[in-house]
Image (cartoon, grey):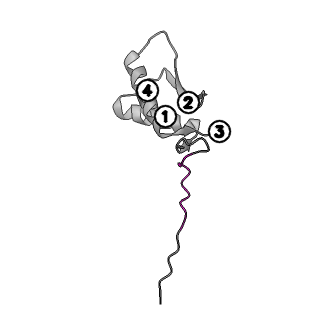
Amino acid sequence: MAAQINQVEPTDTTGPDSDGHLKKPAKTREELEAAIRLEMEDICEWPTDLAISVVSHEDSWKVSIMRDGPQQDADRCEMIEAIADRLRNQFDLKG
């Protein structure tokens, strides 16, 4: 008696799209913003006068950094941009 093997097709949606580009898992704005904040808080304290917003940009997304005062914190802004760049390579923006 031969054993029957059932093959299950993967449900991963990260395969190539109709143009042949690889799809990335998608996250909402809120999920991406939270991921950036979480990583920043692991590195340093999150400043109270700093806010970020993930916005769609062309066929991807970018992070917009807003400050409450005239004080510029270039180092923190660079860290946020670096985290966003890495996450952009891993995730698409939902919706």
Q: Determine whether the residue tagged by mark 3 lies in a helix, strand or loop.
A: loop
Residue of label 4: 80
Q: Name which of mark 1 and mark 2 comes first in the sequence.
A: 2
- Which residue bears the numbered disc 2? 61
Q: Residue at x 43, y 36 (%)?
A: 38
Residue depicted at x 54% and y 67%: 8
Tell me if 44 is positioned left or right of 2 in this view. left
Kindly state the secondary structure of the residue where label 2 is placed. strand
Q: Residue shown at 59%/31% (left/top)?
A: 59
Mark 1 belongs to which amino acid? Arg
Q: Are marks 3 and 2 in contact (CB under 8 Å)?
A: no
> Residue 88: which disc?
1
> Which mark, by number, is residue 34?
none
Do callouts 4 and 2 mark residues in contact (Cβ within 8 Å)? Answer: no
At horizontal 54% and vertical 54% (from top left) the residue drawn is: 12
Q: Nearer the viewer, residue 31 or 60?
A: 60
Report the Cα–Cα distance between label 1 and label 3.
15 Å
Q: Are marks 1 and 2 in contact (CB under 8 Å)?
A: yes
Position above or below: 14 against 40:
below
Q: Which residue is mark 3?
A: 95
* Amino acid on which the number 4 mark rests in the picture: Ile
Q: CA distance from mark 3 to mark 4?
A: 23 Å
Which tag is nearer the camera, tag 1 or tag 4? 1
Q: Earlier in the sequence, mark 4 or mark 2?
A: 2
In the image, residue 11 lies in the stretch drawn in magenta: yes
Q: Nearer the viewer, mark 3 or mark 4?
A: 3
Give the residue type that dot 3 points to: Gly
Q: Earlier in the sequence, mark 1 or mark 3?
A: 1
Question: What is the magenta range?
Answer: 8-16
- The front one of 67 and 65 is 65
Q: Secondary structure at mark 4?
A: helix
How many other residues sit within 10 Å of disc 1, few (<14), some (14-19) or many (≥20)?
some
